[in-house]
Amino acid sequence: MKRILLGAGAAVAAAVTAIAVATSAQASPPVTHAAASAADPTSGLTRYTDSYKVQHPYNLPESARFSVTGGEYNLWILKGDKGYSSGTTTGARTEMRWATNWTSGEHLWEADVLIDPGTTGTCIMQVHVNGPGEAIYIQTKNGNLYNSVNTLLATNMVGKWFHLAAAYNPSNHQVQIWVNGSLALSSHYTKPAGTAFYFKNGVYNLSGSKSETHFKNIALWHG
């Protein structure tokens, strides 16, 4: 299986609202995962490219809440920001909504993540569904990482880079989340309110004055 590099080295303009993430010209040649460690969450999966659209406060230009610098994706919201559309009843967000929707098979998102101090009560990554609810909803509260409301994933994660990986398989409803290469959660989401799933990352909601999160080396995989 080929590992198609996604995100590294792509020249991305902050003003665009949808952009294909390109394969890096400096990336190493494709390799198979036959020799990958059994502990590698991407073992047996194939890396794929995708595009995204930035969802941001509807009354602001994208560049007011999103930027890309040297391959690093920066997303932030401020207290009082509006939702992504004039009619939404949801909270403030700046999120990268990845284009691919899937209905079966394992799909995995991974990235290096930096959460700025002061970011709390904020979701940084989701596996969303085309209906109410989320198969995965990773948020930061008081410096710690949680899935959903109170499932603790890791402590003291603000102000430092860490690696995050999250996978969902609608075929068997399995949820898996890894933090810095260690499996932090393995469970099942058995009551999806829709049939198609997709990835999102960024900042959604906040209980402080500002929430900001940075992502680099984003990669997407499927079974």
Image (tube, rainbow, N blue to C red):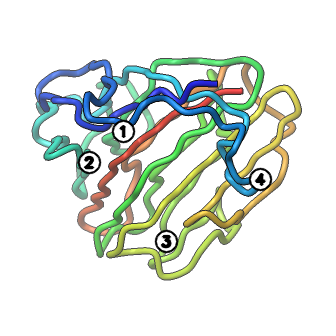
Q: Distance between the residues labelled 1 and 3?
A: 18 Å
Say which amino acid is labelled 3: Lys
Say which amino acid is labelled 1: Glu
Callout 1–callout 2 Cβ contact below 8 Å: yes
Q: How far apart are marks 1 and 4 (CA)?
A: 32 Å
Q: Which of marks 2 and 3 is nearer the N terminus?
A: 2
x, y (%) of residue 8?
30, 38
Q: Which residue is drawn at 29% across and 68% down?
A: 116
Say which amino acid is labelled 4: Ala
- Left or right position of 126 against 159: right
Where 41 falls versus 143 (above or below)? above
Pair 1/4: label in front: 4
x, y (%) of residue 72?
24, 48
- Viewer-nearest residue: 71 or 26: 26
**Rendered-image quadrant of the C terminus:** top right
Question: Which structural element holds mark 4?
Answer: loop
Which residue position holds label 2?
Answer: 75
**Rendered-image quadrant of the N terminus:** top right
Which residue position holds label 4?
Answer: 38
Which residue position holds label 3?
Answer: 141
Pair 4/2: label in front: 4
Which residue position holds label 1?
Answer: 95
